[in-house]
Image (cartoon, rainbow, N blue to C red):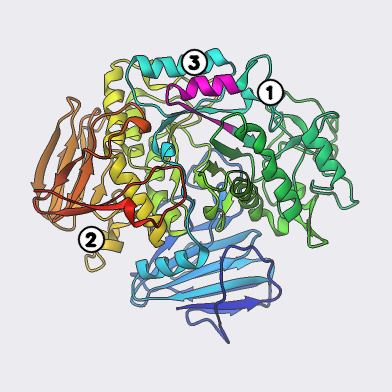
Amino acid sequence: MIQKYVYGTPFETDAVLGQWVPGSGEPAFGTVDLSEGFRFTYSMAEEDIVYGLGEANRGINKRGYRYVSNCTDEPNHTEEKLSLYAAHNFIVVAGEKPFGLFFDYPASLTFDIGYTRSDLLTVFCQGKDLNLYVIDGDTPYSIVRQFRKAIGRSYIPPKFAFGYGQSRWGYRTMKDFRGVVQGYRANHIPLDMVYMDIDYMQDYKDFTVNGENFPDFPAFVREMGEQNIHLVPIIDAGVKVEEGYPVYEEGVKNNFFCKRADGSDFVAVVWPGRTHFPDFLNPEARAWFGEKYRFLLDQGIEGFWNDMNEPAIFFTPESKAEQQQDPMPEIGAFSIPDVPVEEPENMDYQRFYHNVGGSMIRHDRVHNLYGYNMTRAAGEGFDRLTPDRRILMFSRASYIGAHRYGGVWTGDNCSWWSHLLLNLKMLPSLNMCGFLYVGADLGGFGQNTTRDLLLRWLALGVFTPLMRNHSILGSRRQECYQFEHPEDFRHVIGVRYRLLPYLYSEYMKAALRDEMMFRPLAFDFPDDPMAAQVEDQLMLGGEVMITPVYTQNAAGRYVYLPEKMLFVKFLPDGTVSEEVLSAGHHYVAVALNEVPMFIRKGKCIPLAQFAESVAEVDSEHLTLLGCEGAEYVLYDDDGVHKDYENPAHFRTLRKE
């Protein structure tokens, strides 16, 4: 059961759909104090585990630290960081009587989960206007399923989006992109997408293409398509201030940009230089911006990634003036300003306003909704522009509700082993909050990757719906063909395509049933106290457990099996090794060019032959891997259209 407690006059975020039972008095769990802002307090038992917070730092169990929901452009995700790119205010307290809490509040919100005092959960914010949803259930997973149903169906991408993608900040010309595709195809390493970072644009302007570097862009898109390659361009939040640029001129004319207090258009500096921010909280501005995706859709583009939408701000005229510097020095896209990026609680987010139903709302009071509503603008636009076809969309910043319009990647991480493990730990928390199409920058975005780190990270990325290798300008090149023995990369990424019928099927089941694709072991084995302690293994779908190696120079790893399972390794010669292991602790050897996983007892999964693109995966002639006599219900559709509930998409396979 879900009860809704209303405090003050909350801002309508549209995160939760439908009508809910109004709560009265104190919530069933914890107490609320409104004497100074809002403060929720709950006394935790020693054994209580706290799950959730979506894209947040540290572990699957969030107990023992504090977290601030405040969408922040913070690439160095070290352990002390309190805020990352997203704000996902949903937690589940798993104890003797489990319950869930969603704090629907669009400004900065702090979760002190046993940090100040080890037995206290405290959630607080400056404002007093919010909705609190309290969810009662028998198990943590039953609570999650109720919440998932309340917030609406997760976004479903086209099938090609489950292929492997290569990205790098710095691809500028057709020659650059052709070289990447040639490098993969010549080495027979599977590839479906090449991402276009800011350099494809004309002067970093949204919805433009550099005419000198791409003299016939539609023809180039077709050329890539003939090789089963989808180009996926970036769209940034900031619109360049430039006379003669239609997006800028239309936004100014129609008052579609965020305003200063005096009514003038707010100005900030980001990659294009002086920019305005579209007012995505204004439905008319949102519809206008969504329509702009037509420019690229009409040229054959079928996927996008939204970026810089916390929104990221390098500086403003006001912040420069406060520092007694030239108020608006010019900035090029490759010369990051010698000014510290200010924290979200600073003055810049208090300097601009949104038009919400004719009322001017200061940005910091609704800050966490900005990236969400940029993704919403795109999703609503796609529904109008291509109503029968799916378009790939994922975003950097998000709030619960954005999961209905697109996926997320976990932001500008680094080539650190710790970030490989953090990638793993974020997956179930993101699924809890509705985000199913998720992934991280494999190999790490910042710093310089190594061959072994990339191979190990790819062996995790094999299982994540979004599988993208992405790196920063100036770092070591990390396309897979750049390293010795590219056949190892061919094999590891090839495993993704062999597993694609299973992964796509489990994704679709999770989306259509409001379930989680990735789960902590404790969700599936609630009576096993050891399962609740495991944070480096995950259940995937109904049949699989994944156990990636995440330690440098490791020849394998220790695993915990809550039950007897089949240990599977995909070997570089194309064969699969199988070994039944009993419940308990085991050390398993895993070479750099192997992909490990476990299949649960009594289960089987479908396996395809190697393919170099999603279009080439044969889903009709599958083998089954797992237990004799087991059955698997496969979901398979054309990956393009939206007739998701068609019973013809389901068929039952049996392993003889």
Residue 463: percent from the left, percent from the top?
33, 42
Q: Is residue 62 left or right of residue 395?
A: left
Residue kind at label 3, given as amino acid type: Arg
- Disc number placed over residue 348 in the picture, else none: none
- Disc number placed over residue 335 in the picture, else none: 1
The front one of 417 and 11 is: 11
Q: Is residue 354 magenta?
A: no
Is residue 64 in view from this perspective? no
Q: Is residue 127 left or right of residue 469?
A: right
Residue 410: percent from the left, percent from the top?
49, 43
Residue kind at label 1, given as amino acid type: Ser
- For disc 3, the marked residue is 178
Q: CA distance from mark 3 to mark 2?
A: 50 Å
Are circles 1 and 2 on residues that touch, CB within 8 Å? no
Disc number lying in front (3 or 2):
3
Q: Residue furthest bottom?
A: 25
Q: Secondary structure at mark 3?
A: helix
Disc number lying in front (1 or 3):
3
| Number of marks drawn | 3
Q: Secondary structure at mark 1?
A: loop
* For marks 1 and 3 on the same chain, the one whose residue lies earlier in the sequence: 3
Residue at 14%, 47% (x, y): give it.
Answer: 626
Are circles 3 and 2 on residues that touch, CB within 8 Å? no
Q: CA distance from mark 1 to mark 2?
A: 50 Å
How crowded is the residue under tag 3: few (<14 C-alpha within 10 Å), some, or many (20+)? some
Residue 224: percent from the left, percent from the top?
49, 22
Q: Quadrant of residue 196?
A: top right
* For marks 1 and 2 on the same chain, the one whose residue lies earlier in the sequence: 1
Q: CA distance from mark 1 to mark 3?
A: 27 Å
Magenta stretch bounds: 218-233
